[in-house]
Amino acid sequence: MVEPYTVSKFVMVTMKLVGNVIACDDASSTVSLINPELMQKIASIKPPTKGSFLYSAYKHAQSKTILLAYDSKKMIGIDSENFS
């Protein structure tokens, strides 16, 4: 089931277009991958450590990996082919 994505009026989020999806953190500190055409959440990624927030997102062109960097100085790599 695809759900629409909304951000609370007073929540600060990190948001970046990586490839053909938007990566942004939300109030529960998970990272949501959003389809920018429909503004619908297509995936949620749990942080590497509890309470850490998204610091930056980057798509590596050769490996097609989306890299999510957190304020806890940890990084997660996910295959962008799963979200094309």
Image (cartoon, rainbow, N blue to C red):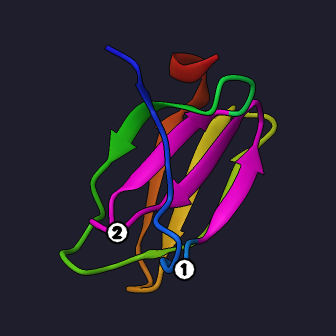
Predominant SS along the magenta part: strand
Identity of the residue drawn at 41% across and 76% down: 53
Give residue 35's quadrant in the image. Answer: top right
Within 10 Å of disc 1 (Cα), the crowding (few <14, some 14-19, many 20+) is few
Tell whether 76 sits left or right of 64.
left
Q: Name which quarter of the figure residue 29 lies in.
A: bottom left
The residue positioned 66% from the left and 62% from the top of the image is 15
Q: Is residue 8 magenta?
A: no
Q: Position of residue 36 (x, y in %)?
A: 71, 33
Task: Say which of 41 and 20 sits in front.
Answer: 41
Q: Residue at x 46, y 85 (%)?
A: 71
Horizontal arrangement in the rendering, residue 55 relative to residue 15 (left or right): left
Relative to 72, does residue 40 appear above or below in the rendering? above
Mark 2 vs mark 1: which is more N-terminal? 1
The percent position of residue 23, horizontal first and vertical second, equals 59, 50
Separation of marks 2 and 1 at Cα, in angstroms = 9 Å
- Label ID, residue 31: none
Tell me, yes or no, whether the highlighted magenta stretch contains residue 26: yes
Asked which secondary structure carries label 2, the reply is loop
Q: Is residue 33 above or below residue 57?
A: above
Q: Which residues are magenta?
A: 14-35
Q: Please tell me whether residue 25 is drawn above or below residue 66 in the rendered image.
A: below
Q: Quadrant of the N terminus?
A: top left
- Disc 1 marks a residue whose amino acid type is Met
Residue identified by numbered label 2: 27
Q: Secondary structure at mark 1?
A: loop
Give the residue at mark 1: 12
Mark 2–mark 1 CB contact (< 8 Å): no
Q: In the image, 32: left or right of 57? A: left
Furthest residue toward left: 50
